[in-house]
Amino acid sequence: MESRNEFEPKIVAFLCNWCSYAGADLAGTSRMQYPQNVRIIRVPCSGRVDPLFVVKAFQDGADGVMVLGCHPGDCHYQQGNYFAQRRYALMHRLLEFTGIESDRLFVEWVSASEGKKFAQVVTNFTEKVRALGPAAIKSARRAQPVREVACGETLQEVSA
Amino acid sequence: MSSVEQQIRDAARQYLENGVYCVTGYERGPRGKVRPAFIYQASDVDRLVWGPECDLNLVNYVHQFKQPLRRGEPPPKVAVVVRPCDARAINLLVHEQQIKRENVKAIGVACTGATPGDPERQACQVCHERVPVTYDTLVQAEGEAGAPPAQDNYTDIVDMENWTPRQRLDYWLKEFDRCIRCYACRQACPGCYCFECVAEQVDPHWTSIALELPEKYFFHVMRAFHLAGRCVACDACEAACPMDIPLSQLNRKLAKEVEALFGYHTGEDPEKAPPLTTFNPAERLPL
């Protein structure tokens, strides 16, 4: 059993339905071991992964984000991963510039037959994020959420 | 009266007498400040003024004239007074099929390089264009020798790149903390013309309207990224910001990377597609 205080990174992975999700499935059915830190979200294509999703994941407390898609040339929709490639080449640099280490965003091509590669990249990425520690952007979140005021509550009760 | 002003008025009169529905320029308001003016009649052209404080991107207002005035008619022709930086936005909107070039008459004012209004304005310090890339009428000031065009080496951006990520995060969180989410940056931008902005979308509800730091961070990073490869570097967003958030640094960072990765300059050529709207199967970018 690991100690309660040890940092377990939260990782959000966007997997393309046609390659990487099947690759993850293969890793599972082949009983390969990979860290449980990864939370998989299935998307139709890596081109569907708006950079908005990545920022949103960080905003909501992710320590790392993975975007996995088909190898260039293998996209089910012919070109989605090419768009994703351009987008994420820029997004890496913008995240780095605004203070989220670019190592926290990982983009890779994993095909349906690469269950082993899937397990490998998830393990490597989890260890990398574990070494980086919790994402600093999380410290921006107010510790005490703003409480909703109930109907009929007086000002004294609210500020108490 | 400066001759630039007279030339703008002459051009406006000529356009209005030849089928242009509206001329967008500047006029002086009741308290002496300049404000956008929409001139519909040739008899009103004398309201138009020009001066160093005219520092909005008026191309933003052509979005109001994209729809036909009456059903079945083509959209109206409009004319707009532009500086070199604003003219790049015309090329951007033409490429994105928001406007037809022949429907928008550009009254281009050659820039002297003197910073309009705000001497600290970053865009003007590194601007290398004196004549608009596209125009229908060129207005030139007589006998005014402009400042020599600057070379943009992105020195301020490179400086920030040498900080640690934590320093940069702290810097941006401090800057974004002032944001009151008035969206003035978005409203001032000719490139921000979505009917429904992600910042205000309710379904899906990407981000709340809370004035919390993560939400502000989300808004500013997304605003910058939506303009990646599309920002024309007019700095209208930063000028519009009531809280003085250095938005131009985000835009310039992306411009720097777009230039390095794709060799693309926004608005230079209406035929060239912004890099994120196209791809090259042969390229392998560092991810």
Image (cartoon, grey):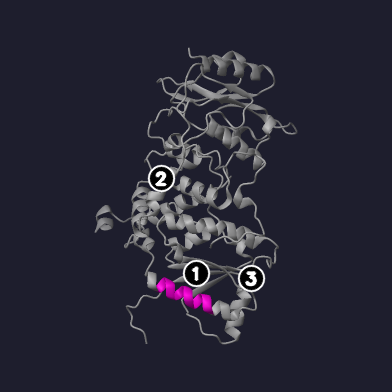
| Residue B8 pos. (x, y %) | 56, 19
Could you tell me how many numbered marks the image carries? 3
Identified at 65% across, 41% down, the residue is B95
Q: Residues within 10 Å of mark 2 (few under 14, many from 20)?
A: few
- Indicate the quadrant containing the C terminus of chain A: top left, top right, bottom left or bottom right: bottom left
Asked if both marks, 2 and 3, belong to the same chain, the answer given is no
- Indicate the quadrant containing the N terminus of chain A: top left, top right, bottom left or bottom right: bottom left
Q: Mark 2 highlights which residue?
A: B155
Q: Mark 3 highlights which residue?
A: A17
Q: Mark 1 highlights which residue?
A: A12
Task: Name the chain under label 1.
Answer: A
Quadrant in which residue B9 is drawn: top right
Q: Is residue B205 visible?
A: no
Q: What's the distance in space between the residues labelled 3 and 1, CA to CA?
A: 15 Å
Q: Amino acid at mark 1?
A: Val
Identified at 59% across, 13% down, the residue is B43
Q: Residues within 10 Å of mark 3 (few under 14, many from 20)?
A: many
| Residue A36 pos. (x, y %) | 47, 79
Task: Name the chain under label 3.
Answer: A
Q: Amino acid at mark 3?
A: Asn
Q: Is residue B279 left or right of residue B139?
A: right
Identified at 48% across, 78% down, the residue is A123
Please identify the dominant SS of the magenta region.
helix
